[in-house]
Amino acid sequence: MPPAQKTGKKTRDTQPFSDIVRLAIPNKGRIAAPVMELVEKSGLHLAESGEQRRLITRTLDPHVEILFARPADIPGYVENGAADLGITGHDMVTERGADVQELLDLQMGRAKLVLAVHEDSEIQTPRELNGHRVATEFPVMARTYFARKKINADIVQVGGACEATPHLGIADAIVDLTSSGTTLKTNRLRVIDEVLVTSTYLIANRDSLEKKKEKIDEIHLAFESVIRARGQCYLMMNVKKGCLDAVKRVLPGLSGPTVMDVASSEGLVAVHAVVSEERVYMLISQLKQAGARDILVMSIQRMIR
């Protein structure tokens, strides 16, 4: 029997192992810019930018590369191993039914998938949609929702402008994403139920979690530290020892302020604390009155516990 000929094709099982972690992120859409900012703040700076940026772009970490993809495609890329990690919406993962691990809620792109009807509609509850048409870009989640409630609705899949379908007579209701509710109000739509709450997640391929655990844990920690630092700032000040107790009472701090001696003949100590940005405006005045001086307010890029 002649030896088997080589076809030149490689199956997924025969591909050589690579220690590079590929992270798929959105190439467009409302979360693309915030995700790119997160990547940069985490320290995974892109080696290429602007027009030079390619579909797969290197980072300054030689073991991490970025794949730019449509948010809807990212769950599939991560599931089949084309990417080890991905950043996309929980709604996308659920709609695609992707077998991936959701590692971290990135706390951006929060929205709700809602069931809505025209404000003049006589329909008040989901049950009244039995036998009616419902338009959506999310047919899987819509069918799951109605099956759970034992409602026989006719799902009409649309590719966009879902909110216009009740006006056009295409559907009696819609299942669509909303963040602020402005688009629904503009199109005179009224929410009658909430289907799903979604956010943007860091997701992982299950095999990669085992084979590339060390690097994935490193990326996970980097993103988590950026998220933890959001809305926080770092206060530094000098305080006379006699005023220290009064200053401590003013400072909320995450774990209480840090106090260090200062090489000064004035009996000063340095006080450092992490505080919420929204409290800084009032705190500065209170700290001055309590005896603090030389106050510095600094932004925090990352915070690791």
Image (cartoon, grey):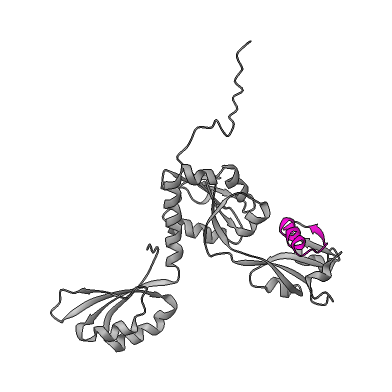
Extreme residue toward the bottom, this view = 289
**Based on the displayed image, in which of its 4 quarters is residue 42 positioned?**
bottom left
Residue 245 rendering spot, x and y as whole percentages: 26, 85
Residue 10 rendering spot, x and y as whole percentages: 58, 29
Residue 68 rendering spot, x and y as whole percentages: 56, 49
Q: Quadrant of the N terminus?
A: top right
Q: Nearer the viewer, residue 136 or 214?
A: 214
Name the side, left or right, on which 163 lies relative to 291: right
Extreme residue toward the left, this view = 265
Extreme residue toward the top, this view = 1
- Identity of the residue drawn at 37% across and 83% down: 283
- Identity of the residue drawn at 44% across and 62% down: 226
Q: Quadrant of the C terminus?
A: bottom left
Residue 145 seen: yes
145 drawn magenta:
yes
Residue 154 rendering spot, x and y as whole percentages: 83, 60
Q: How many marks?
A: 0
Q: Nearer the viewer, residue 232 or 13?
A: 13
Name the side, left or right, on which 13 lies relative to 169: left
Name the side, left or right, on which 290 lies relative to 187: left
Residue 45 seen: no
**Based on the displayed image, in which of its 4 quarters is residue 147 positioned?**
bottom right
Q: What residue range appears in magenta?
A: 137-157
298 drawn magenta:
no
- Identity of the residue drawn at 49% across and 50% down: 49
Compared to residue 254, the image places residue 47 above or below, namely: above
Compared to residue 166, the image places residue 252 above or below, namely: below
Name the side, left or right, on which 26 lies relative to 246: right
